[in-house]
Amino acid sequence: MQPIQKTAAIKRVMDLIAIPGKSCEESSVSEWIQAELTKSGIPASAISIDTAHKRSPSGGETGNLIVKLPGTVKQPRRLLMAHMDTVPLAVGCKPIRSGDTIRPASATTALGGDNRAGCAVVLTAISEILRQKLPHPPLTLLFTVQEEIGLRGARYLTASKLGKPEHCFNWDGRDPASLTIGAVGATYVQIEVAGIPSHAGVHPEQGVNAGIIAAIALADLQQNGWHGLVEKGKKRGTSNLGVIHGGSATNVVMPEVSIQAETRSHDSAFRDRIAGEFRKAFNRAAKQVKTSTGQTGTFSLDEDVRYEAFRINETTACVKLAAEAVAACQLSPQTIIGNGGLDANWMTAHGFPTVTLGCGQHNIHTVDETLDVPEFLTACQVATQLTASV
């Protein structure tokens, strides 16, 4: 196997980063990737798009991009994947290179290396396989949508289009030597608090302030250790109040508050318990705030499991193959368990255990985000090693 074409790989990732494509708006990214695939010699008949966006609650412009190729050797099919979307903060980024670092030209945008770097790694691997005419097993390439808003592309994936891959690999993260073989599960919590409106200056005692109910409940959760890092005995998880909206005028006792929160844990039962403590706290708070005649407000709480935790055994074939590819690139492979969700959560749930490898991303989702060029190029070499039958 020859070394990869580094200049082409760097140009590929720079071009990808420059394309706007936050969650639900990935069509331009998908079209660019398709054009690159056809330029590499992949026939249009091998490329398809599923209908994940039509099943996702978020809608969206396009579904997951799937490429299915025959092998030149008879071996189990392998899948290489990455997600196409970025966080909104990366929209408008113009990437620039300074030595071994790619960063945004503006101080007001993220880079979007998460996860255009992963897409570039997969594209580089298939480009090198075809350029060098390397023997390879049947291959599936998967570029997902809506990863950043709850892994919805992978969740609503049309799995029957993948061709039953046995060994699956995802690129999304920092260290190309790290093999993420497990990740946390997360539940989205939507809370609606209904107070009782009244004139805040004339008859405030006739109202119930929804904001006060929310404040009491959230203070309860914080004081009793159910918000932030949650540790109860040997159980561990996290919760977070992420978004809160309420009211429209200062002269009206606030009639409603809408709250978005989440709970996470590697233990699904404990994650459910954290959400249950949210319910109990809001129930107690709603009973405490009353009008002068004893009326109280109400609340509703809905839970949506965004993804379940998973863990792949280190003896699984895909883990061994990933470790061998990393070692072949003169690195020491290390398995890790992540506390963030990955498309691998849903891939594993679909019956496709998936190892996630890094591709040089640093400080993701912030204006300080950068891409480490040597780490990115190493990830491209690892992916090429994993793709070829050598």
Image (spheres, helix red, strand yellow):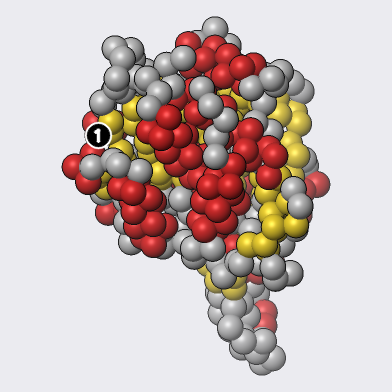
Does the rendering let one see residue 55? no
Answer with left or right where residue 60 lies relative to residue 377: left
Q: Residue at x 38, y 38 (%)?
A: 142
Q: Residues within 10 Å of mark 1 (few under 14, many from 20)?
A: some
Q: Nearer the viewer, residue 267 or 106?
A: 106
Q: Residue at x 53, y 27 (%)?
A: 2
Instruction: Tell me where residue 279 appears, x and y as whole percent.
Output: 58, 46
Instruction: Specify the quadrant of the image occupied by residue 171.
Output: top right
Q: Residue at x 34, y 54 (%)?
A: 35
Q: Is residue 68 above or below residue 147?
A: above
Answer with left or right where residue 389 lies relative to residue 52: right
- As drawn, the residue found furthest toward the left would be 45
Q: Secondary structure at mark 1?
A: helix
- As drawn, the residue found furthest toward the bottom would be 202
Q: Which residue is mark 1?
A: 161
Q: Nearer the viewer, residue 87 or 289?
A: 87
Instruction: Tell me where residue 134 appears, x and y as whole percent.
Output: 40, 23
Q: Which amino acid type is shown beneath numbered disc 1?
A: Lys
Instruction: Tell me where residue 303 appears, x and y as whole percent.
Output: 48, 45
